[in-house]
Image (cartoon, rainbow, N blue to C red):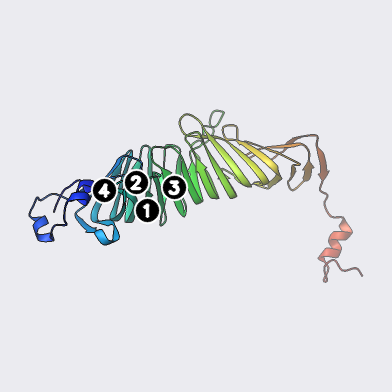
Amino acid sequence: MIEFLATAFFATQPVQPAAAASAVAPRAPSAVVASPKGGETEITSKRMTILRDQSTLRFKEDVRAKRESMDLRCDELTAHYAQFNGKYTATRGECVGNVRAVDGERTAQGERADFDVPNRLLVVTGNPEARDSSADLKGSELRLMLGSQNFEVKDATVTLRSAPLEGKGAEQNIPVVITSKRVAGTRAQASFMGDVVVKHRTLDLRCDKLTAYYNGTGEVTRADCAGNVRAVDGDRRAKGERARLNVPSRMLVVTGNPEAEDPMIHFRGTQVRMALGGKSFEGDDATVVFKTAPLKEQQQRKDKPGGTKQP
């Protein structure tokens, strides 16, 4: 097995036979590969193969790649390289099997990963999962930019820690679970787009787009919904164009031609307010229609054979 500087090796050295290479030193093979935009990627593994005709390096067994703030591990990695200004530089890395990545406070895992070296972008697929200081994420594709706190996830399910509730004796530490077609976020907030569904305590909240905001300890404090808002909390329902959920106060405020109803009333106004787990509504500029019980003769007719048919 051999250890060498890949850029110098490609430029000046012939490929050694396997037998001669194994006699040099009993150390795991490694390569330090330059990037077209600067920096180096160091890769180690138990076995390495150089394919000059395909411009690739193949690493197998206990593969570990390090670049800047990222530590990437997998079962097998294929590194693609090209020649820029007379030097061989890494362009892309393809990982397969038990992918695990750590970049600062973020961790990710899956079955496959594609690393765009010049753009410092890692894309994890194959049932990917990720975690940072504020959320646990699952989806069909996970994208991480090296050294950044941002992330993007497709077909996402995100579990956020909720901020403490106001008032003594309130049950705490109930997470906010959000699913959507796509999510992108930073340390301070996350944006969810497409078929957004929020589950928190007794609330089922749906909309086209949602932005969740965190406090300094990574707990979600507020969620703002926009587009086709529909909320269900127990036997109460509300809809409108916009909604804001204040997590510590458990208050949902629906605006944009809001409507709400429960078994007794149908409510319209400029604003509808409902506390999670409660039984009532509050609102501004209200128009309320009370639902009435069926008349006695209507109920009798309904109970007869033939249902509501007139005699």
User: Looking at the image, is mark 3 or mark 4 earlier in the sequence?
Assistant: 4
Left/right placement of residue 83 relative to residue 18 reads: right
User: Looking at the image, is mark 3 or mark 2 earlier in the sequence?
Assistant: 2
Front residue of this view, candidates 38 and 199: 38
Left/right placement of residue 237 relative to residue 88 reads: right
The residue under label 4 is which amino acid type?
A: Arg
Cβ atoms under marks 2 and 1 closer than 8 Å: yes
Image coordinates of residue 290 in percent, x first then y, are 82, 45
Do we see residue 112 in this rendering?
yes
* Residue position for label 1: 113
Mark 3, Cα crowd under 10 Å, few <14 / some 14-19 / many 20+, is many
* Residue position for label 3: 143
Left/right placement of residue 94 relative to residue 260 reads: left
Front residue of this view, candidates 122 and 105: 122
- CA distance separating discs 2 and 4: 10 Å
The residue under label 2 is which amino acid type?
A: Ala
- Identify the residue at the far left of this view: 23
Label disc, if present, on residue 101 of the rendered structure: 2
Image coordinates of residue 270 in percent, x first then y, are 77, 36
Question: Eyeballing the image, is 138 above or below 49?
Answer: above
Mark 1, Cα crowd under 10 Å, few <14 / some 14-19 / many 20+, is many
Front residue of this view, candidates 249 and 156: 156
User: Looking at the image, is mark 1 or mark 4 earlier in the sequence?
Assistant: 4
Left/right placement of residue 27 relative to residue 290 reads: left
* Residue position for label 4: 64
Image coordinates of residue 291 in percent, x first then y, are 81, 48
Mark 2, Cα crowd under 10 Å, few <14 / some 14-19 / many 20+, is many
User: Looking at the image, is mark 2 or mark 4 earlier in the sequence?
Assistant: 4
- Identify the residue at the far right of this view: 311
User: Looking at the image, is mark 1 or mark 3 earlier in the sequence?
Assistant: 1
The residue under label 3 is which amino acid type?
A: Arg
